[in-house]
Image: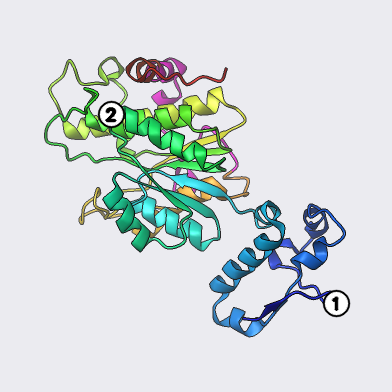
Amino acid sequence: MILRPTHSRVIMPAAITGRDSTARYSAMRGPTAAWRAAFVVDREPRRRCDRHYRRLERAVLESYIGETAREIFRMARVFITGSADGLGKMAAELLIEQGHKVVLHARSAARAEETRKKVGGAEHIVVGDLSNIAETKSVADLVNRLGWFDAVIHNAGIGYREPKLVKTVDGLPQLFAVNTLAPYLLTALITMPKRLVYLSSGMHYGAGSHLDDMLWEKRRWNGSQAYAETKFQDVLLAFAVARLFPEVKSNSLEPGWVPTKMGGAEAPDDIDKAHRTQVWLATSDQPAAAVSGRYFFHQKLRDPDPATKDVERQDLLLDLCRKVSGIALSAT
């Protein structure tokens, strides 16, 4: 591919051509803006490898006009928790492939190093154990130091095969700490993005009857039930955020039962569809994705458990998270 500036010939990137190209291109102020964004492209390599062409085209344009390129290409900056493997890693790879800027998260420095080798093109990798309140707060601080994000995907989670109750250093059930409290804390502490995406599960249906014992202090442990309850709580949290922050698009989804490390090899659903909805909700300008307080499955609206829309239940969850963490989530 050959790229060179020219005063006489301007080839506009495909993303800024079309009916509204004039309005978008006018964002590049200054008499030399057109020249600075102009380049001649050998089109043959594009036919051979369109994906690499688009990536290089974005890089060249951004080097000339900085943040304006993100607006032109509608590039987003996205933080994904639990992105060292599984669906988080798959979502990160798809976002990077689409030209978005992605910050990953890993539980430990060792996993971060492994992830760095596996996922090329990530902007940064933030390290922190989300079962630990102090480390979760540190993750939020590190993310804020990196600047503002367009979207946060709350992907991190542990599964339903917990044979016994495991307590964290903070004295909380590990399932609750990672699956529920961590996304609550990160939502409260990270500078609010435009979009928030919370991963739930089809197991959340019918799992909202024990909000008086979310920490399993009164019942005999059941790992599958505990997991289902945290996924119910994730939908509660997404809907509570949508209610409290109307300027933010906050949604939840179920990726399906897919053959990941968590889902197991016997899982029957299509792994290729499992990560696409969260990417779509985080970045798409399609009207169907530009909503809030909704629940999705494979980019289609799905009715959640009706109890997740109960404001009193949402507030019960927020109150408990505030009490155990000392951090409040409020619009004021």
Residue at horizontal 58 percent and vertical 38 percent from the top: 194
**Magenta region includes residue 265:** no
Q: Amino acid at mark 2?
A: Phe
Residue hosting label 2: 176
Label 1 CA crowd tier, 10 Å (few <14, some 14–19, many 20+): few
Q: Position of residue 276 (x, y in %)?
A: 45, 54
Decide if residue 2 is in sight here.
Answer: yes
Q: Is residue 253 left or right of residue 74?
A: left
Res 319 quadrant in image: top left
Question: How is the protein colored in the picture?
Answer: rainbow
Decide if residue 270 is in sight here.
Answer: no
Residue at horizontal 33 percent and vertical 28 percent from the top: 134
Q: For the view shown, which residue lies furthest in the right direction? A: 31
Q: CA distance from mark 1 to mark 2?
A: 62 Å
Q: Is residue 51 left or right of residue 155?
A: right
Instruction: Give the secondary structure at mark 2.
Output: helix
| Mark 1 vs mark 2: in front | 1
Number of numbered discs on residues: 2
Q: Earlier in the sequence, mark 1 or mark 2?
A: 1
**Magenta region includes residue 302:** yes
Residue hosting label 1: 8
Q: Which residues are magenta?
A: 290-318
Residue at horizontal 23 percent and vertical 24 percent from the top: 172
Q: Is residue 102 above or below residue 10?
A: above
Instruction: Give the secondary structure at mark 1.
Output: loop
Q: Position of residue 82 (x, y in %)?
A: 35, 45
